[in-house]
Image: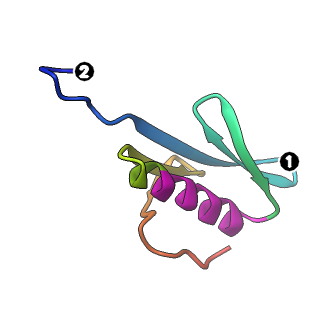
Amino acid sequence: MIGGIRRPLRSTFRVSGEGEAWRVRLGDTVYGEFLSRGDAIRGACLGARTAEARGGKAEVLSAPGDERMPHYEPHFAD
């Protein structure tokens, strides 16, 4: 809290391929496992939008290279 104003938390959802699955992590916690990159990105985007609806800030980063993904629009690519 700064000057009586509560700062929103920032949630970073990271999408990465691990073996045959795609995994979404929120910090050190596994947020979900998916069969395709597209499904993992959609899951991460849903989590980011939910975090923002609760007053926080969020971002989605995807492998390879922590590419920043817009989470305010649907993703259909696998």
Look at 83% across and 53% down and name the residue there: 21
In the rendered view, does 49 fall on the left or right side of 14? Answer: left
Q: Residues within 10 Å of mark 1 (few under 14, many from 20)?
A: few
Q: Is residue 74 above or below residue 54?
A: below
Residue 7 position in % (x across, y down): 26, 31
User: Which label number is shown at residue 33?
Assistant: none
Q: Which residues are magenta?
A: 36-50
Residue 34 position in % (x across, y down): 78, 58
Residue 41 position in % (x across, y down): 61, 61
Look at 42% across and 48% down and name the residue there: 54
Q: Amino acid at mark 1?
A: Gly
Which residue is under mark 2?
A: 1
Quarter of the image where one finds residue 4: top left
Considering every residue shown, the one lying at the far left of the view is: 3
Task: Name the image quarter holding the N terminus.
Answer: top left
Q: Is residue 62 above or below residue 56?
A: below
In the rendered view, does 74 fall on the left or right side of 24? Answer: left
Q: Are marks 2 and 1 in contact (CB under 8 Å)?
A: no
In the rendered view, does 42 fall on the left or right side of 67? Answer: right
Look at 50% across and 55% down and name the residue there: 50
Is residue 73 one of those drawn in magenta? no
Q: Is residue 11 above or below residue 64?
A: above
Q: Amino acid at mark 2?
A: Met
In the rendered view, does 28 fall on the left or right side of 60? Answer: right
User: Which label number is shown at residue 19?
Assistant: 1
Is residue 48 one of those drawn in magenta? yes
Considering every residue shown, the one lying at the far bottom of the view is: 76
Q: Residues within 10 Å of mark 2 (few under 14, many from 20)?
A: few
Look at 51% across and 49% down and name the residue there: 61
Q: Secondary structure at mark 2?
A: loop
